[in-house]
Image: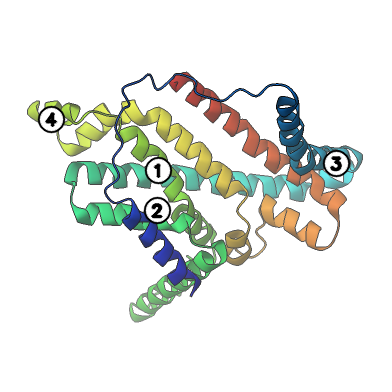
Amino acid sequence: IMLLIVVLLLSTERYSRRKQKLFQSQFNSHEDFRYELSGWKKWAALVWCWGLVAVAFILPLLQLIDYSITYFEQSWTPEFREYAWNSLVVSVIAAIIGVAVALVVNFTHRVNGKRESLAFMRLSSMGYAVPGTVLAIGVMVAVLFMDYRVNDIAKAMEWGRPGLIFSGSMFALIFAMVVRFSAVAIGSIESNLNKISPSLDMASRTMGCTPNTMLWRVHFPLVKRGALIAALLVFIESMKELNASLLLRPFNFETLATYVYNFASDEHLELAALPAVLLVLVGLIPLVVVNRSLEQNH
């Protein structure tokens, strides 16, 4: 039911702006039209905005940092380093595959231009809107089906049963990350590809470039900054994904997100502080890089 509701809402949103077009305004788009406050309104807005940031982010982060320093010896364990490495490996692989999928999907639609390719691209972007638990259950059903079929084939060929090679490994978790967060990469690369003039495609075809050559020698150098931003965003989302990690992780496999969840559910907030701070830092540092890149673009 949740999945049907999500599909209905996404379809309604796409249909409502099906004829929406973006045109460059006649005035300078970089001109600042912000309304500048003065007097008590300025200070009230400043106190309100910074008050929200302080209560929702700064104060909890300071408390976590205090716990991390106080209980550092109890938190800095071989298990913590192992789980941090697990999160890093899963997130990097998911980011690379997600960006590759986004490049292929966007470029296929650009070259093809048919409704089928557009529908496939929109379908590939639905994973981000689906709740993580629902997506994890769907992925689990799919990978279990693949495991059963592989074992049936191995049995028919009189080979040894390979076991749960998909659902019992990192494959299921990485697959769920890619399905869920490819939408982030698709949107980022799509916005960069739309800035490339179609005349470059025509010139490349006139010079005899194949679609693959056009992708790697013409389009990719122009969208590589967008691809890097997309990879960072997928990496951040994968690092802190909890629902899919809880349901799809292999046995004796933990990530930082599940590590924090286990301590927090047992009310051991002091021991959960160090991995929580690490997750915050991992999320903040790439965002700083992304913001600087966007500022350079402007």
Type of residue at label 1? Gly
Q: Earlier in the sequence, mark 1 or mark 4?
A: 1
Q: Which residue is mark 2?
A: 125
Residue at 40% across, 59% down? 10
Spatial CA span between label 2 and label 4 = 28 Å
**What amino acid is at disc 2?**
Ser
Q: Amino acid at mark 4?
A: Met
Q: Tell me the SS state at disc 3.
A: helix
Alpha-carbon span between mark 1 and mark 2: 8 Å
CA gap, disc 3 and disc 4: 58 Å
At a point 60% along the width and 44% down the height, the residue shown is 88
Q: Position of residue 147 (x, y in %)?
A: 44, 72
Q: Within 10 angstroms of label 2, few (less than 14), some, or many (20 or more) residues?
A: many
Residue 191, above or below 149:
above
Image marks 1 and 4: residues in contact by CB distance under 8 Å: no
* Foreground pick, 17 / 258: 17
Name the image quarter holding the C terminus. Answer: top left
Q: Which residue is mark 1?
A: 187
Where is residue 170 shown, x and y percent of the image?
Answer: 54, 58
Image point (50%, 22%), residue name? 295
Residue at image position (43%, 49%) is: 182
Kindly check if marks 3 and 2 are in contact, taking CB atoms under 8 A apart as contact: no
Q: Amino acid at mark 3?
A: Gln
Check disc 3 and report the residue beneath it.
63
Looking at the image, is mark 1 or mark 2 earlier in the sequence? 2
Numbered mark located on residue 202 in the image:
4
Q: Are marks 1 and 2 in contact (CB under 8 Å)?
A: yes
10 Å crowding of disc 1: few (<14), some (14-19), many (20+): some
